[in-house]
Each structure stands twice: as C-alpha cells, then as structure tokens.
Image (cartoon, rainbow, N blue to C red):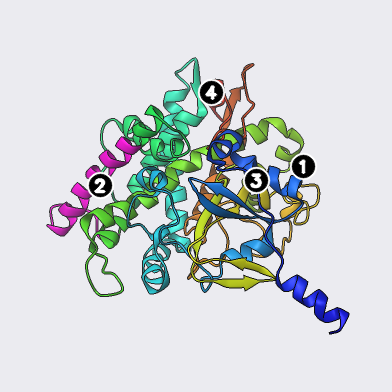
C-alpha cells in the first residue's frame, strides 16, 4: 500500500471535533449569538459536535458549510425546529418546516407577493404610516424608537396584507413582537410568547374564515385573500390554522424588522462619517446591508440530516440536528475583510455568494430556504434610513445604547430614546 493511500484512508475517516460534556443547552442560552463562534475559535474548526436538549447536534459556520447545509439532498427542515420555537416564532405547519414539493409549492405562494411592485407598495404604505406617527412623536417629550417603530411596521404590514387594522394597534404589535422576542427565554417570559402566538393565530383565523365566507370587502388581490384561498401541492385548500400561520409569517417578520431599525438608528449615531455619505438610494442600500451583516438578528438556523452521508471525510448520521451559524458566518474572518469594522463600502459592487452573506438565512430564493422577505427587509430599512436621516430632526440623550450578544434577539438596552422629535 502506498503512502498516498494511507493518507486517503485517514482523510476518509476524519472525525468531527466533539465538545466534551453531557449537555450544553444552558451554555447556548447564556452565550447566545457567540455559542458557535466561541467553539469555532477554541476547536479551530468550522464544524463540530455538541449536545443540545439531550441529543447530538452538529454546528457549522462559514460559506462552505452554509452551501452544504442548504443542499436539500442532504438536509431536511421537517422536525428541525424545537417545539418552543414552533410554539412562539414560526408556528406549526408553516413553510419553514416543509421539504420537497410541499416546500417549493408553499414558498411559491410567498414569492408571488414579493414582486418589485409589492415591495414598493409596502415601502410607500410604511412611509405614509410613519408620517402619521411623526405627528404624534413631535408632541411627546421623548419616545422609544424601537417600541414605536414596531407599531409603524405592524400597521404597514396589516395594510399591505389586507388584514383590517384595529383601534389599539400598539397592543397588537406588542403581541406579535412577543413571538420573536421570547423563543430563547425560559419560564414565564416564554409562556407569554406561547400565549401571544395562540391568541394571534385565533385572531388571524377569524379573518381567513371571513374571506372564505365572502364576509370581507376590499381584500381582492391581497395576500390575505391569496393565502386564505391557497391550495397546496395536492390541490387541497390549506387548513384555516395553517393559512393563519402563513399570514403571520408575513406580519411577524415585517414587525421584527424593528430590531434592525433600532440598530439602523444606532449606526447613524455611532458612525456619522458613514451617515454623511447617504446621498442616494444605492448608498442607503449599502448602509443597511452592512447593518444587517454587522449587527445581530437571527443567531442560527436548524435542519436535520436527511440520510447518512459522508462529506470531506466527515460522517453525518440520519436525523442529526444541525445548526448553521448565521451571525458567525457574517463575521467570519475567512469570509470578510476586517469583519469587526462597520464599513458599508464593502457592499459596493459586491459579488459574494448566497452562502456568504446570510443574515436571514442563505441559499436561493425561489426554491431554497432563504427568507422570502429579505428584499422587503432591505426596502423598508432603506426607507427608515431615508426618513431618519433626511426628514427627521431629533436629539439622542445620554442613555444605555449597548447591547448584549447573550440576549436573543439583541436590542440596544434603551430601545433608542429620541427627544425633541420634529419633521424636517
């Protein structure tokens, strides 16, 4: 046997580095966004095994690993999201947990309402809602930007989807936000998110049933109508509960853009030199893309191994939980030059891959698991930059602007307090 054959055998039987210990779920909760990042440094590997919730979990980071993770021949989404996440963030039966033809058909339903005209429509609706709220903000001594922008985004989301707006939109916006603010919490806070999900689904089911019974006017051509009447890949109408979950999978993520909005306001304050360059929509796009790369949003996403396979000498066993580090990939030194610097110019003429820049997931839009609303996020953030930078005068008093990477989602501690708000 030649030496090269021995080397080949050794490579074919490489073990995935393994973290010692019985279970590291509590460490994940304590370390938050840095859980995978910390172990990548200590193990000097973009792939390692750990134990979470009593089972083996493979953790991946970097674009090469992301490309592997989004190979639907190797990984599936069914059964990947833990129950606590389903019960708060995603809901049960939604597109995030589907695979194969069922996923492609359901994803197409979302992509049909994400055309360029749709994106410009919601951007316009958001701007109109923003102006109405500015008239209220200017009468107040101070306002918390994060809390208030949640309401503006929620109202724009409802108007765009065709869901009737209620009188107390602030309370409903807070209910929706519980879904994305509580999944990583335990105890009473998590139960609050669970209840918020249950109540919101009941609220949305009532509108789905009204559409099906012909009891709602002015819904023609809206996502509310399209999702309520949608038929799956087998030609069956979605259960009302599933249609409600998918409508919330529009309204919840749009409301969650408030997290990025708070970081956008923070970036405008902390990087005035970059803010001075925002003289065009293209410049604003580069700025918000860097906000999405630099600041935390989703920490990671989950899948399960579809069937046993070997990749570059590493063995993946069927049904093993696998986590892809989104935050860590966006800060990976092998992917980004000086990833710890806030530098929007890195996106000028950027030619990266769909597996390198993954703040809301990676892969392809049409048939993969990349977030269908990513470009809507970009459009709305560009409008927020435009309104904050060009059409709003305000003071930022002394406050706690820091944020913790151990909190999911991470949000500036003060929520960004603005004083003396005036339209310009």
Q: Please tell me which residue is depicted at 57% across the width and 25% down the height of the picture.
A: 413
Q: Is residue 199 magenta?
A: yes
Element type where label 2 sits in the image: helix
**What residue span does the magenta drawing correspond to?**
194-221
- Image coords of residue 78 (percent x, y): 41, 62
Q: Earlier in the sequence, mark 1 or mark 2?
A: 2
Q: N-terminal of the two: label 1 or label 3?
A: 3
Location of residue 244 with respect to 77 vertically, above or below: above
Spatial distance from mark 4 to mark 1, Cα to Cα?
30 Å
Kindly identify the residue that appears in the image at 41 percent across and 37 percent down: 177
Left or right side of 270 for 375: left
Quickly name the residue at label 1.
Answer: 341
Q: Quadrant of the N terminus?
A: bottom right
- Is residue 21 shown above or below 175? below
Say whether marks 4 and 1 touch (CB < 8 Å): no
Report the Cα–Cα distance between label 4 and label 3. Answer: 53 Å
Residue at the disc numbered 3 = 20
Which residue extends farthest right? 3
């Amino acid at each position: 046997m030649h030496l090269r054959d021995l080397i080949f055998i050794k490579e074919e039987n490489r073990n995935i580095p393994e973290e010692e210990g019985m279970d590291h779920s509590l460490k994940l909760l304590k370390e938050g966004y840095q859980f995978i990042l910390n172990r990548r440094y200590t193990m000097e590997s973009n792939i390692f095994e750990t134990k979470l919730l009593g089972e083996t979990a493979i953790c991946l980071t970097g674009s090469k690993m992301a490309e592997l993770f989004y190979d639907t021949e190797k990984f599936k989404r069914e059964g990947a999201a833990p129950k606590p996440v389903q019960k708060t963030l995603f809901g049960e039966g939604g597109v995030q947990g589907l695979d194969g033809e069922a996923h492609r058909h359901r994803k197409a339903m979302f992509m049909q309402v994400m055309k360029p005209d749709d994106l410009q429509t919601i951007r316009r609706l958001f701007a109109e809602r923003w102006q109405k709220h500015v008239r209220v903000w200017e009468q107040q001594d101070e306002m918390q930007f994060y809390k208030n922008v949640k309401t503006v985004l929620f109202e724009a989301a409802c108007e765009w989807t065709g869901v009737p707006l209620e009188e107390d939109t602030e309370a409903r916006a807070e209910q929706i936000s519980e879904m994305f603010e509580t999944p990583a919490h335990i105890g009473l806070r998590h139960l609050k998110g669970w209840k918020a999900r249950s109540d919101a689904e009941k609220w949305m089911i009532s509108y789905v049933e009204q559409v099906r019974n012909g009891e709602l006017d002015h819904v023609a051509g809206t996502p509310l109508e399209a999702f309520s009447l949608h038929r799956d890949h087998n030609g069956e109408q979605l259960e009302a509960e599933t249609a409600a979950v998918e409508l919330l999978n529009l309204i919840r993520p749009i409301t969650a853009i408030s997290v990025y909005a708070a970081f956008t306001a923070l970036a405008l304050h902390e990087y005035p030199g970059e803010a001075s360059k925002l003289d065009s929509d293209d410049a604003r796009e580069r700025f918000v893309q860097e906000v999405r790369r630099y600041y935390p949003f989703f920490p990671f996403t989950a899948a399960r191994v579809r069937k046993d396979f070997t990749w570059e000498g590493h063995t993946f066993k069927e049904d093993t939980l696998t986590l892809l580090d989104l935050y860590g990939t966006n800060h990976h030194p092998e992917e980004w030059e000086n990833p710890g610097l806030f530098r929007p110019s890195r996106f000028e003429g950027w030619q990266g891959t769909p597996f390198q820049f993954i703040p809301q997931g990676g892969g392809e839009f049409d048939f993969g698991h990349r977030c269908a609303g990513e470009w809507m996020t970009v459009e709305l953030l560009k409008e927020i930059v435009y309104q904050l930078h060009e059409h709003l005068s305000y003071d930022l008093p002394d406050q706690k602007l820091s944020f913790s990477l151990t909190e999911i989602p991470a949000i500036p501690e003060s929520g960004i307090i603005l004083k003396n708000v005036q339209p310009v």
